[in-house]
Image: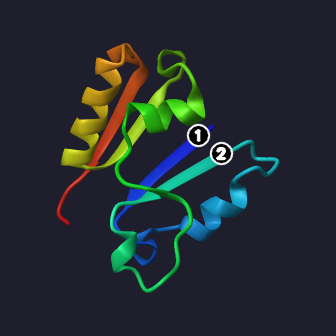
Amino acid sequence: MFAFSSNKRPEDAAFVDELKRLDGSKANVTFIATMTEPENSHQPWDGETGFFDQDKITKYVGDLRTLIYYLCGPAGLVKAMRSLLTGAGVDDDDIRTEEFTGY
């Protein structure tokens, strides 16, 4: 399983430490986090930066059309990721979504 997470700064990211511990464990989880504003952080960040795009995701998963996706987050993020995936040839039946509103 690949778990992608995008936040502005490390201190804004929920469960990052827990997900990092799962990365490479016997749970067979690869955790990839990116920070879009690491320069505004009080914590150091040496991972991915910027927004997820097709190239950044492909770097980790290979052919995007071979997986099933579960997208969750703010409506704008979910919409953008769905558009990215369908534009890359992922079948809409292979994308599940849940939008979080109110924040």
Q: Is mark 1 on a helix, strand or loop?
A: strand
Please, what is the three-letter code of the amino acid marked with disc 1?
A: Phe
Percent x, y of residue 5: 45, 53
Q: In this rendering, would 64 be left or right of 31?
A: left
Which numbered circle lies on residue 2? 1
Q: Tell me if 66 is positioned left or right of 55 in this view.
A: right
Q: Residue 24: x percent and y percent?
A: 76, 49
In the image: residue 35, left or right of residue 60: left
> Quick one: label 2, few (<14), some, or many (20+) residues within 10 Å?
some
Q: What number is the disc on residue 30?
A: 2
Whether residue 38 is situated above or below residue 35 in the rendered picture: below
CA neighbours of label 1 inside 10 A, class few (<14), some (14 to 19), many (20+) = some
What x and y, as percent, mark residue 56? 46, 38
Count of numbered labels shown in the rendering? 2
**Could you tell me how far apart the alpha carbons at marks 1 and 2 are, in whole angstroms?**
5 Å
Quadrant where the image shows the N terminus: top right
| Residue in the picture at 70% in, 56% down | 22
Q: In which quarter of the image is the C terminus?
A: bottom left
Q: In this view, does 4 lie above or below 10?
A: above
Q: Nearer the viewer, residue 6 or 50?
A: 50
- Disc 1, disc 2: CB below 8 Å? yes
